[in-house]
Image (cartoon, rainbow, N blue to C red):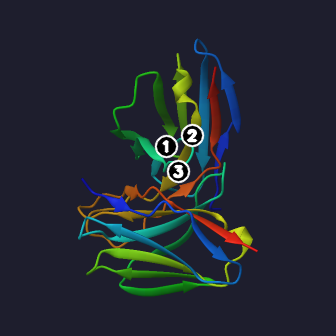
Amino acid sequence: DTEVTQTPKHLVMGMTNKKSLKCEQHMGHRAMYWYKQKAKKPPELMFVYSYEKLSINESVPSRFSPECPNSSLLNLHLHALQPEDSALYLCASSQVQLAGARSYNEQFFGPGTRLTVL
Amino acid sequence: QKEVEQNSGPLSVPEGAIASLNCTYSDRGSQSFFWYRQYSGKSPELIMFIYSNGDKEDGRFTAQLNKASQYVSLLIRDSQPSDSATYLCAVRASGGSYIPTFGRGTSLIVHP
């Protein structure tokens, strides 16, 4: 199974709402990622979890709060978002590469959540 | 700053032609190289990866890697209108990092 699932597919929220995005994978991957993608731009890395621990936060505003409850699940909690946060939010997973080991470490992406902030 | 460069395009080719997409990278120690296809409004889909110098073929797709010149390319033979998409190059750098850096993508249009 090489599938990463994300829910919901679409989300419309007001600036005062609290919502969560969910991501799940069953490939045994121990690295999970959140990306934000605007139209005609490449994916922009937000957070990386490695072995369920937050390893990278790319200076993301605190209105985005990630959570990794277990090795298969990744959440992104949203609160007090701004209209400019409207984007496609992508979850991805991969193996964790050890330094010097030969591995492709390809990332598998979920279908994304299209977020609109009003 | 590790950089991955792609021409944003659009690259327009006629149906049945070979489409050639190029990507250059700045980190000479880069280890692994990936090509993703992304249709408008959809998520990136991995189509090829390559590790060693030379060519790797999979169906109509061929990835070519030249580490000395620090470029990786993707050739699509017998291009079809369904190949019209943005192609993202991603490079996993040296130093044990498992996180790839993405180029900005090349838009490919295959016209009938």
- SS class, disc 2: strand
Q: Residue at x 58, y 15 (%)?
A: A15
View extreme (right): residue: B112
Which circle's residue, 3 or 1, is located before the other in the chain?
1
Q: Which amino acid is tagged 2? A: Tyr
Q: Quadrant of the C terminus of chain A?
A: top right
Q: Which amino acid is tagged 3? A: Ala
Can marks 2 and 1 be said to lie on one chain? yes
Task: Look at discs 2 and 3 and give the one toward the viewer.
Answer: 2
Q: Which chain is indicated by disc 3?
A: A
Q: Give above or below for A80 relative to A95.
A: above
The x and y percentages for residue B86 are 58, 60
The x and y percentages for residue A13 are 65, 21
Residue assigned mark 2: A89
Q: Give above or below for A76 relative to B44.
A: above
Confirm or deny contact between disc 2 and disc 1 (CB under 8 A).
yes
The x and y percentages for residue A84 are 52, 27
For the residues marked 2 and 3, what is the alpha-carbon distance in whole angstroms? 10 Å
Query: Which mark, by number, is residue A92?
Result: 3
* Foreground of the two, A72 or A49: A49
Confirm or deny contact between disc 3 and disc 1 (CB under 8 A).
yes
The answer to whether B101 appears left or right of A99 in the picture is right
Task: Look at discs 3 and 1 and give the one toward the viewer.
Answer: 1
For the residues marked 3 and 1, what is the alpha-carbon distance in whole angstroms? 8 Å
- SS class, disc 3: strand
Query: Which mark, by number, is residue A35?
Result: 1
